[in-house]
């Protein structure tokens, strides 16, 4: 569905069910260069089990209008604007990679808005190397290749996903190409510049689950351990054989972890 | 800085998760109609497209799934759906997005089945086609109508072997916001990955070079994931709610694989042209050696082109690798590893001499197929293209003296010796 946030049109998939803010809400926030489709093996599940689902595209990504945002803080403000525009309460926020930094920032600024927080494949910060940053600015195809080469683990590189017929790397690359030309560089710049994770994490009140990918080359275990250590109320789950793109590479295990955590912390009367 | 698996590795490994129970190295043949669900929640999730999984082999099957993911991976597409034949793939791909009142712009140089589908069958369902000369992109542009929803062609045209200018045709599609679908059977992804040049969808008869051994019929549709279905209201089957799946909007939910998902959700369920698990297994064995076979096909083809070009009983030879061919430059550009292993040539003496040549050959098999490991020959005017009218025959560049050769993997000296026998017979007939 499309809606307006501070004068700019935003797109979010609702998982195939109408959005109803009276229900518990699950919001899925994508990572750098991504869009709502990264969540299609999680979002629809919750939408058909009593939750209102929102998987928005950040500004300048796929279907959302506006210039890409260039800081994590601005993205957190924008996400809060999404919540206010749709009167979202009782939110379970699920975030991947860069989205986790946004979630930490939002969780520290508006600690009472969240009922639970699921952080997938992230640390407290996401430093980006110069080669990738400059490629994202000057050679977008090279940057897309780097991102997908490093981001996907064996399931991606060998097209071993559980959805018959799908080859997830090509799909991921198409999503990046479909974003505005500035989006990837803006996202990576925001990641690289964000330095407030250590201060934000301790202020998150909601229960947090940290989902770690055992073969993640972008958010290695050292980084995810540091994240979990700074959160006051966190549990950690490891998906041993997944690369960074957990929602696509290990969708069934990821969905099961989210299901157990969100059903417990933000029940919706589901079966 | 970036590292992806290469073609030969993907040919052997893509799509397969090694069987966790027994460790079978080869992809097992899951010869089953249906699958036991662990619980009702999992069952409903699969039916509702919330998760991947298998419910019924008409829709998906684990062995077929390995083949689909391998083909998608080799093509660089976002998803693939395998079908019972190449024609089934073409039919499913077209009808996934076109319906009553819609229009196709298609090349004249195509397999006779493709031409018949568009000329005879689809019009009964309200889908019409305007054909264009594949050597003239302007003709393609001129044929576009307000209701055109698809541009279709074969990269290596059958049987004239003219090469479609992929980038030019893709630009026409982009200008009109119409997807460009390529029948990539003759090139396979080893010789050309059409998505790299702007095509949006490929279809294959995997019966041919992909399988390569003439033992299994099959087809595939590959979604390039690179067409923005949401930028227009022309494609409601992709962008509007789909009632049978709780009003799902495939474009919103699945993005780059929305088109393939539509085929899976509609064609495989409502029409049912599914590939058998056994055929998928056989085709997987073929794909494991795709690059090796294609290299040998190309080497033998070049040798035979030299042989035929210098043979006194041959009136003409047609192949895009020959500098005399009008598509030579396009072949160098799009098919640098080789322009396929189909060769057409004329036998001096006309129809009867051509017939004598074919009947005298012993090694080359006279049959209606291409892309086998074995060398094949046929007379198109009386076989593969016999059901199309004279006008279409001429438009496709078919003459009565034409022999179509599908170059196999035998020792090329033996193929030449066999052809020597055939040409001696043709010479005797021509001399009468």
Image: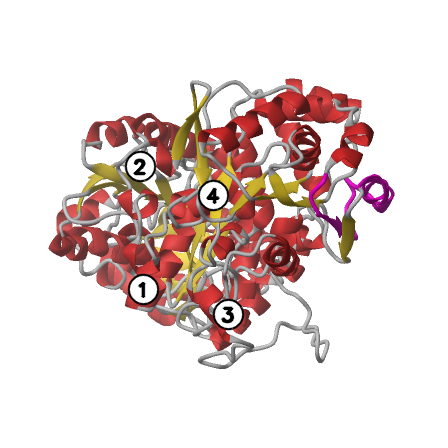
N-term-proximal mark, 2 vs 1? 2
The residue tagged 1 is B428
| Picture quadrant of residue B240 | top left
* Residue at x-position 77% and y-position 58%: A240
Q: Gap between marks 3 and 1, in whole Å? A: 74 Å
| Picture quadrant of residue A231 | top right
Judge if badges 1 and 4 mark residues of a common chain.
Answer: yes
The residue tagged 4 is B256
Residue segment shown in magenta: A205-231
N-term-proximal mark, 4 vs 3? 3
Q: Is residue B313 visible?
A: no
N-term-proximal mark, 3 vs 1? 3
Tell me: B332 left or right of B228. right
Q: Which mark is residue B134?
A: 2
Judge if badges 4 and 3 mark residues of a common chain.
Answer: yes
Which of pointers 1 and 4 indicates the residue nearer the eye?
Answer: 4
| Picture quadrant of residue B113 | bottom left
Which of pointers 2 and 3 indicates the residue nearer the eye?
Answer: 3
Chain to which the residue tagged by mark 1 belongs: B
Where the C terminus of chain B falls, by quadrant?
bottom left
Judge if badges 4 and 2 mark residues of a common chain.
Answer: yes
Tell me: A71 left or right of B382. right
Q: Residue furthest front?
A: A112
* Residue at x-position 60% and y-position 51%: A248
N-term-proximal mark, 4 vs 2? 2
Chain to which the residue tagged by mark 3 belongs: B
Q: Gap between marks 4 and 3, in whole Å? A: 27 Å
């Amino acid at each position: 569905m499309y809606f307006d946030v501070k004068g700019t049109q935003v797109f979010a998939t609702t998982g195939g069910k109408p959005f109803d803010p009276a229900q518990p809400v699950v919001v899925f926030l994508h990572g750098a260069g991504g869009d709502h489709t990264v969540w299609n093996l999680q979002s629809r599940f919750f939408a058909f089990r009593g939750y209102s689902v929102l998987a928005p595209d950040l500004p300048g990504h796929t279907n959302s209008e506006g210039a890409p945002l260039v800081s994590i803080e601005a993205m957190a403000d924008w996400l809060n604007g999404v919540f206010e525009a749709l009167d979202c309460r009782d939110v379970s926020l699920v975030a991947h990679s860069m989205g986790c930094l946004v979630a930490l920032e939002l969780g520290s600024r508006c600690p009472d808005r969240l009922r639970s927080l699921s952080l997938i494949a992230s640390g407290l910060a996401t430093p980006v190397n110069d080669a990738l940053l400059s490629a994202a600015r000057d050679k977008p195809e090279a940057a897309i290749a780097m991102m997908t080469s490093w981001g996907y683990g064996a399931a991606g590189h060998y097209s071993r996903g559980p959805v018959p017929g799908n080859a997830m790397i090509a799909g991921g690359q198409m999503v990046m190409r479909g974003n505005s030309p500035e989006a990837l560089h803006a996202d990576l710049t925001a990641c690289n510049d964000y330095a407030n994770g250590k201060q934000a994490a301790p202020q998150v009140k909601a229960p947090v689950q940290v989902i770690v990918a055992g073969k993640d080359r972008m958010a290695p275990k050292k980084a995810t351990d540091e994240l979990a250590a700074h959160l006051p109320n966190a549990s950690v789950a490891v998906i041993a054989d997944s690369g960074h793109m957990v929602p696509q590479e290990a969708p069934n295990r990821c969905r099961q972890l989210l299901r157990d955590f969100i059903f417990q912390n933000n029940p919706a009367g589901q079966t | 800085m970036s590292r992806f698996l290469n073609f030969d590795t993907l040919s052997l490994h893509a799509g397969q998760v090694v069987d966790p129970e027994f460790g079978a190295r080869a992809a097992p043949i899951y010869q089953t109609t249906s699958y036991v669900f662990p619980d009702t929640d999992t069952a409903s999730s699969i039916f509702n497209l919330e998760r991947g999984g298998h419910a019924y082999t008409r829709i998906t099957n684990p062995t077929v799934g390995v083949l689909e993911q391998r083909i998608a991976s080799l093509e660089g597409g976002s998803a693939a759906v395998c079908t019972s034949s190449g024609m089934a793939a073409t039919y499913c791909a077209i009808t996934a997005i076109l319906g009553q009142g819609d229009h196709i712009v298609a090349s004249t140089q195509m397999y006779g089945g493709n031409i018949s589908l568009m000329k005879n069958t689809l019009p009964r369902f309200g889908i019409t086609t305007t054909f264009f000369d594949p050597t003239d992109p302007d003709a393609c542009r001129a044929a576009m109508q307000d209701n055109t929803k698809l541009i279709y062609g074969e990269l290596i045209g059958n049987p004239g072997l003219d090469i479609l200018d992929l980038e030019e045709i893709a630009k026409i599609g982009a200008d009109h916001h119409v997807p460009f679908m390529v029948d990539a059977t003759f090139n396979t992804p080893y010789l050309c990955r059409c998505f790299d040049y702007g095509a949006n969808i490929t279809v294959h008869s995997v019966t041919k070079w992909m399988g390569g051994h003439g033992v299994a019929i099959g087809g595939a549709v590959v979604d390039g994931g690179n067409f923005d279905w949401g930028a227009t209201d022309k494609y409601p089957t992709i962008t509007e709610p789909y009632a049978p799946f709780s009003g799902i909007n495939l474009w919103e939910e699945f993005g780059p694989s929305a088109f393939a998902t539509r085929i899976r959700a509609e064609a495989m369920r409502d029409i049912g042209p599914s590939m058998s698990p056994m055929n998928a297994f056989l085709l997987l064995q073929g794909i494991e050696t795709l690059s090796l076979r294609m290299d040998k096909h190309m080497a033998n083809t070049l040798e035979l082109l030299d042989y035929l070009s210098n043979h006194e009983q041959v009136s003409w030879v047609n192949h895009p690798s020959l500098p005399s061919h009008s598509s030579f430059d396009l072949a160098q550009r799009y098919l640098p590893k080789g322009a396929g292993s189909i060769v057409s040539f004329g036998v001096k003496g006309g129809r009867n001499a051509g017939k004598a040549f074919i009947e005298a050959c012993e090694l080359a098999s006279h049959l209606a197929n291409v892309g086998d490991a074995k060398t094949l020959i046929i007379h198109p005017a009386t076989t593969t293209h016999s059901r199309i009218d004279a006008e279409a025959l001429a438009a496709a560049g078919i003459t009565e003296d034409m022999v179509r050769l599908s170059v196999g993997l035998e020792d090329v000296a033996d193929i030449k010796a066999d052809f020597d026998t055939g040409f001696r017979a043709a010479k005797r007939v021509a001399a009468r």
